């Protein structure tokens, strides 16, 4: 009786082993069929990633060009401005780095890129002029390219590209004015176009959900822009009575622009089927306004930059295009009032916390020496 039981257990155990072996063979065979071999084709790169890498490459190239020009410039020949440009472009390259990926499609070499038109005769005034013109044109072109790409990129990258592009365009304009150079014509909206509000057509449902007050949405971003324009209008109205004739003329022009921006922001709010924030009766102005109203107007313009930056990241299509143009225009207005040019307009970033650029790899420029001549 016990012998029969042992035989049955032994048969059942071998049966389970055989079953497991068959299943393993089936799984292995199926896996070999279903898992395709690596074709060696890299995955498609998204538009946003391609725009970021291209922006990084341009920033590195321009930084090297600015460094070379600064090294060869006389102390009284724009050297401080070139130093500022180097700092600006270094910050841009740091902000555009991908901490989880390669620095660039191109290999960073130890030799700086040579701007178009540069010759070896750096002491020649004509050669210097050509180098400056080429650098400024390249800086402006890079800035406008970043602004164009910001319209199509994903939210966070769009905001970064808009900040980089705005700063580069403004720096190119500053250098062109200082060096008496003419920038290439760009198809861009001028500030005078902001005087005409363009309401967006809305097709609102009978009942739309109300977002959480603390959530980041297009509605909350537009509401922040509306509030910033309401405050700017009040400050400009008060400042008009305290500025001299020349500054009052500029303030009156900017007041008209802010009134137009408010109308446009309210139109965007309606298009998103939301309610615009009600305006305040007044705002408490700090002692800084009393001491220097013009400088305070610059700080008001700077304060609006993160609001437009948020809207760039959280909007699409025409609303984003409007936010990008408004970001650049607000940064330009802040400079009119003597405010320092932000390294990344619209981004609240501490440049000291950005990752360091990797050290360039040195390349041998001469053949190695051989023994015996």
Image (spheres, rainbow, N blue to C red):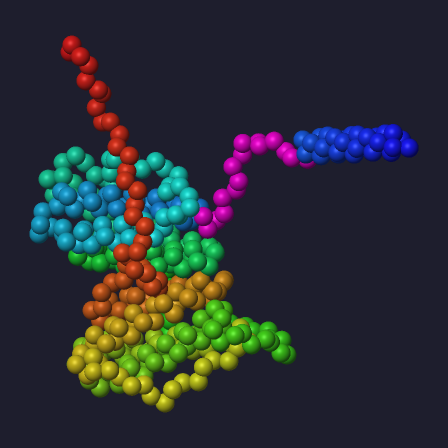
Q: Position of residue 62 (x, y in %)?
A: 27, 46
**First to last magenta residue range:** 33-49
Q: Is residue 205 above or below residue 117?
A: below
Magenta-colored segment: predominant secondary structure: loop
> At x 34% / y 80%, what residue is drawn?
231
Q: Position of residue 171 (x, y in %)?
A: 25, 57
Q: Is residue 333 above or below residue 105?
A: below
Q: Is residue 243 magenta?
A: no
Quadrant (top left, top right, bottom left, bottom right) of the N terminus = top right
Residue 168 in view, yes or no: no
Q: Nearer the viewer, residue 235 or 93?
A: 93
Q: Position of residue 185 (x, y in %)?
A: 32, 55
> At x 43% / y 63%, what residue is drawn?
312
146 on left or right of 33? left
150 on left or right of 77? right
Q: Is residue 36 magenta?
A: yes
Quadrant (top left, top right, bottom left, bottom right) of the C terminus = top left
The furthest residue to the bottom:
281
């Amino acid at each position: 009786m016990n012998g029969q039981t042992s035989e049955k257990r032994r048969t059942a155990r071998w049966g389970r082993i055989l079953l497991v072996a068959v299943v393993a063979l089936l799984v292995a065979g199926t896996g070999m069929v279903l898992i395709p071999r690596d074709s060696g084709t890299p995955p498609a790169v998204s538009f946003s990633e391609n725009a970021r890498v291209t922006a990084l490459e341009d920033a590195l190239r321009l930084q090297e060009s600015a460094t070379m020009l600064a090294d060869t410039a006389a102390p009284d020949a724009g050297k401080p401005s070139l130093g500022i440009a180097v700092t600006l472009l270094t910050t841009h390259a740091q902000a555009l780095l991908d901490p989880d990926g390669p620095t660039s499609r191109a290999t960073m070499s130890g030799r700086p890129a040579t701007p178009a038109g540069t010759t070896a005769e750096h002491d020649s005034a004509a050669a210097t002029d050509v180098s400056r013109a080429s650098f400024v044109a390249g800086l402006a072109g890079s800035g406008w390219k970043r602004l164009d790409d910001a319209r199509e990129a994903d939210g966070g990258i769009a905001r970064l590209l808009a900040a980089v592009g705005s700063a580069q365009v403004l720096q190119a304009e500053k250098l062109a004015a200082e060096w008496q150079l003419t920038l290439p014509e760009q198809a861009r909206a001028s500030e005078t176009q902001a005087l005409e509000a363009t309401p967006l057509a809305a097709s609102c449902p009978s009942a739309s959900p109300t977002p959480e007050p603390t959530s980041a949405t297009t509605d909350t971003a537009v509401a922040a822009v509306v509030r910033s324009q309401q405050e700017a209008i009040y400050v400009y109205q008060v400042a008009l009575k305290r500025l001299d004739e020349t500054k009052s003329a500029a303030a009156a022009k900017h007041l008209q622009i802010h009134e137009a921006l408010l109308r446009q922001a309210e139109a965007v709010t309606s298009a998103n089927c939301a309610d615009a924030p009600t305006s305040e009766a007044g705002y408490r102005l700090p002692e800084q306004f009393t001491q220097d109203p013009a400088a305070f107007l610059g700080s008001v313009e700077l304060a609006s930059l993160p609001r437009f930056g948020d809207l760039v990241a959280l909007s699409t299509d025409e609303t984003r295009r409007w936010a990008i143009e408004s970001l650049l225009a607000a940064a330009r207005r802040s400079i009119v009032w003597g405010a320092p040019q932000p390294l990344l307009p619209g981004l609240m970033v501490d440049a000291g916390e950005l990752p360091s650029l990797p050290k360039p790899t040195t390349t041998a420029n001469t053949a190695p020496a051989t023994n015996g001549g």
